[in-house]
Amino acid sequence: MTMIDSTLTAASPAAERLPAIVQLLRAVHPDAKCALDYTNPLELLVATILSAQCTDERVNKVTPILFARYPTAQALAEADREELEQIIHSTGFYRNKAKNVQEACRRIVAEYGGEVPGNMDDLLSLAGVARKTANVVLGNCYGIAEGVVVDTHVKRLADRLGLSAQTDPEKIERDLMALAPREEWIDLSHLLIFHGRRFCDARKPK
């Protein structure tokens, strides 16, 4: 690890501290990446929708069964709703998630030829997709940095590290985008999420 500027303190401006924070996080979490298992944009889109109020570990147990049964957007769009709900039941809020998955897939089939679109506006037109989900898909599947993924871990870390005083995810995202260069937006979210899971627990940080 290279030397971190010892003159930096918690009182230093966030823009000055962030490069050192990122450097340290990369050293501690060299394996930071998307924790959801997927092989294509559709699988990641659906997995991210299912991950709301649910752990990635639980989603990763459900999606192999789901995609073996319904491997395409067309198949998901035409799936029996009750069967779909049964498969994803353990992820919580299963009725709403099943509805969103099917409506999103119907639009993907009708408007985008069965392929998940690769731009923010089109992704946001899909049911169940807000900026967090769109950023996950764009960053991990298309290598496009349109923003920073702000989940519960990023929200907590942004506050504890003094990177944002906001509580609204979109406002936190704007603060992080202003602090970090665009080429670091994708990695920044992965690093903060990994650190939040491994060390900076919500109730009792290590």
Image (spheres, helix red, strand yellow):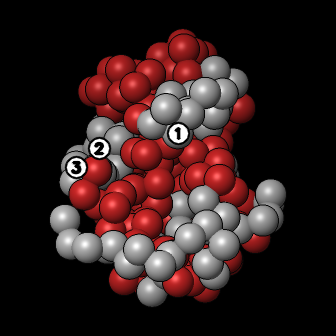
Q: Secondary structure at mark 3?
A: loop
Location of mark 2 (residue)? 38
Question: What x and y, as percent, mark residue 192?
Answer: 47, 54
- Report which quarter residue 134 is drawn in: bottom right
Tell me: 139 left or right of 122.
left
Q: Amino acid at mark 2?
A: Tyr
Q: Residue at x 22, y 49 (%)?
A: 31
Q: CA distance from mark 2 to mark 3?
A: 17 Å
| Comparing labels 2 and 3, the label whose residue is closer to the camera | 3
Task: Check the image and report above or below for 49 versus 33.
Answer: above
Location of mark 1 (residue)? 200
Q: Residues within 10 Å of mark 2 (few under 14, many from 20)?
A: some
Q: Amino acid at mark 3?
A: Asp
Q: Residues within 10 Å of mark 1 (few under 14, many from 20)?
A: some
Task: Check the image and report above or below for 41 versus 139.
Answer: above
Tell me which numbered mark, 1 or 3, is placed earlier along the sequence.
3
Tell me: 181 left or right of 158.
left
Instruction: Give the camera-side residue of 83 and 37.
Output: 37
- Report which quarter residue 90 is drawn in: top right
| Comparing labels 2 and 1, the label whose residue is closer to the camera | 1
